[in-house]
Image (spheres, grey):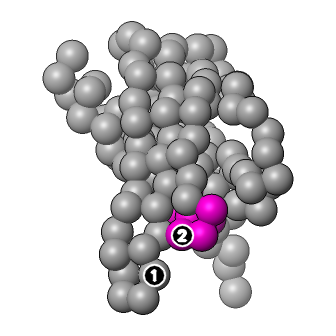
Amino acid sequence: MKDYVQIWFEHLRGRRQASIPARIEILGEYNKHTGPAWPRAAVRLVVEPAEAFEVVDEVEKTDDLEQFAHPDYVMIGLLSMLMTASSMPILKIRVTLKEVKIDPIETTRMAFEMAGRDAGRKILAAMKQS
């Protein structure tokens, strides 16, 4: 069987890449009651134009953050929005992670991914306004 994920990736890599018009500071959040759990996380980041995709993590490392695989899940959520939201993937950017907010009991990896997706949605909305 074909590896459709690889085909999709090659398709995206072969397309022209877009950037953003100016520096944007965003707060991506996830705070949703889902039955017995209430996963939550927030990430404040700055996105600015760049020649290629780059991530700068300025968040102080703690044991709590390590268990959530920070910043991997934030980036997975962010990229899931930016790679597919326009005719060209928005990858010519520098993402600087400034701050994260966690709840030691309720934060999950999925909450970080969803906070990244929220940040991606807000970046796209800010781009439409400019």
Q: Residue 91 placed where, x, y %?
A: 55, 31
Residues at discs 2 and 1 in contact (Cβ within 8 Å): yes
Mark 2, secondary structure of its residue? loop
Residue name at image x 56 percent, y 64 percent: 107
* Magenta region, residue range: 104-113
Picture quarter with the C terminus:
top left
Q: Residue 22 placed where, x, y %?
A: 39, 11
64 relative to 99 in the view: left or right:
right
Q: Which residue is mark 2?
A: 106
Q: Could you give the CA–CA distance between mark 2 and mark 1, rounded to whole angstroms? A: 7 Å
Query: Does the magenta segment cover residue 28?
Result: no
Q: Is residue 23 above or below residue 80?
A: above
Identify the image quadrant of residue 68: bottom right
Q: Is residue 11 visible?
A: no
Residue name at image x 63 percent, y 62 percent: 104
**Hey, what amino acid is under mark 1?**
Ala
Residue name at image x 50 percent, y 55 percent: 41
Mark 2, residues whose alpha carbon is within 10 Å: few (<14), some, or many (≥20)?
Answer: few
**Hey, what amino acid is under mark 2?**
Glu
Query: Does the magenta segment cover residue 111?
Result: yes
Q: Residue 55 placed where, x, y %?
A: 68, 30
Mark 1, secondary structure of its residue? loop
Q: Which mark is residue 94?
A: none
Residue that extends furthest to the top in the rendered view of this protein? 22
Q: Residue 71 placed where, x, y %?
A: 69, 46
